[in-house]
Image (cartoon, grey):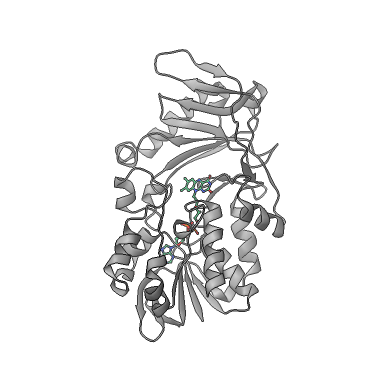
Amino acid sequence: MISIVGGGLSGLYTAYLLQQKGLAFQLFEARERFGGRIKGLPVGDSSHLELGPSWFWPHQARMQQLCAELNLPYFEQYVAGDALYQLPGRPMQRFQGAGTMTSYRLAGGLTKLDAALVEQLPRHALHANAPVAHVQYQQGWQLTVNGVTHNSDALILAAPPRALINKTNLAEQLSPKLVDRLASTPTWMAAQAKFVAHYSQPFWRQAGLAGDAFSRTGPMVEIHDASAHEQAGFALFGFIGLDAQQRKSIAPKQLEQACLKQFADLFGPQALQPTTFALQDWQHSPYTCTQADINQATEHPNCPVHEFTDELASLNLYFAGSEMANEEAGYLEGALAAAEGVVLRI
Ligand SMILES: Cc1cc2nc3c(=O)[nH]c(=O)nc-3n(C[C@H](O)[C@H](O)[C@H](O)COP(=O)(O)OP(=O)(O)OC[C@H]3O[C@@H](n4cnc5c(N)ncnc54)[C@H](O)[C@@H]3O)c2cc1C
């Protein structure tokens, strides 16, 4: 039996690959939902707006391949039209050619990818609301979940290393050097916040605007079209420019209203009439974000563990999770790459 800790994209894809190899597994997910950092705001007809990741890119072959395999259509990020630049005390600047880099979005939202993977997996092997609090290696692994002990031969950790160290006693089972390596690996985008608003009409597109805006006034600093489909589920989103500490001193409702006002300043008064909206502040998600991620400026993760090969082999322990990938670490593609690497080795 193999245990997987974490039911984000990496854990689910690990399970999907193990199943293809005919290997038995149990997956434990702390939250009440699968998906991890992939999280959606529902906007009718089973579509979602992205509250976590939005994009993958043409060079990321695994994401494209998996979407094709699961029959999930994707589309190019909407960039037709002009972009805006907002500076304090200055008139709005409008310029041509918003996006130069092609990026892809999953039609209906990335939660479709999690749902499609879950659909392929045996229900009895997937456990939500199942935080792994305690792990111990003694001729195999013993995992304590909600007070119950589960035994397994191998352990695959498919979660951000900092979150694992914070929420379990994993550090007790590892050498101090490996613990240091894991604890110093930042979790990509962990302390970010996004504001998303859904509209019945794409009024910015109708005005020749791409929905792209860059702002020095805030509260959002980078804004894009966030529509759930190429021509439906119209939406805008922005990354909040205030850091995690600064956001703690503002009531979420006040920040939401400031974001709606900023959309209106940029794109017109219709922006004040969203059908629904949400502010997602990831700093409040302890299975994603730790104090170290709040204290440290966002950095790309890089956590090589080849020098710990013997230690990991002696424990039958494997790291999936995007932060632990050898390529595209931190990204959705990295989550798939890390899973693939583990399943090749196990
Ligand atoms: C705001 C934001 C924007 C982003 N934008 C992009 C983007 O545009 N493109 C891109 O490629 N990437 C983006 N990312 C990164 C992307 O979300 C991640 O690379 C990807 O989702 C990581 O998947 P994962 O499965 O490795 O980790 P996670 O999604 O973090 O999943 C780990 C899972 O493990 C669970 N877990 C943790 N500890 C335990 C425990 N003790 N017991 C049980 N379960 C546990 C967690 O609850 C979680 O579900 C973004 C992230 C954020 C937050």
Seen from the viewer's position, the closer of residues 255 and 206 is 206
Determine whether, in the image, residue 202 is placed left or right of residue 12: right
The quarter holding residue 340 reads bottom right
**Residue at the (69%, 38%) spot, across then down:** 230
Seen from the viewer's position, the closer of residues 309 and 322 is 309
Counting from the top left corner in percent of width and height, residue 216 is at 41, 24
**Residue at the (65%, 30%) spot, across then down:** 201
Q: Is residue 286 visible?
A: yes
Q: How many marks?
A: 0
**Residue at the (41%, 43%) spot, across then down:** 192
Q: Residue furthest front?
A: 307
Determine whether, in the image, residue 245 is placed left or right of residue 281: left
Counting from the top left corner in percent of width and height, residue 121 is at 62, 70
Q: Is residue 317 above or below residue 84?
A: below
Q: Is residue 146 visible?
A: no
**Residue at the (63%, 76%) spot, across then down:** 21
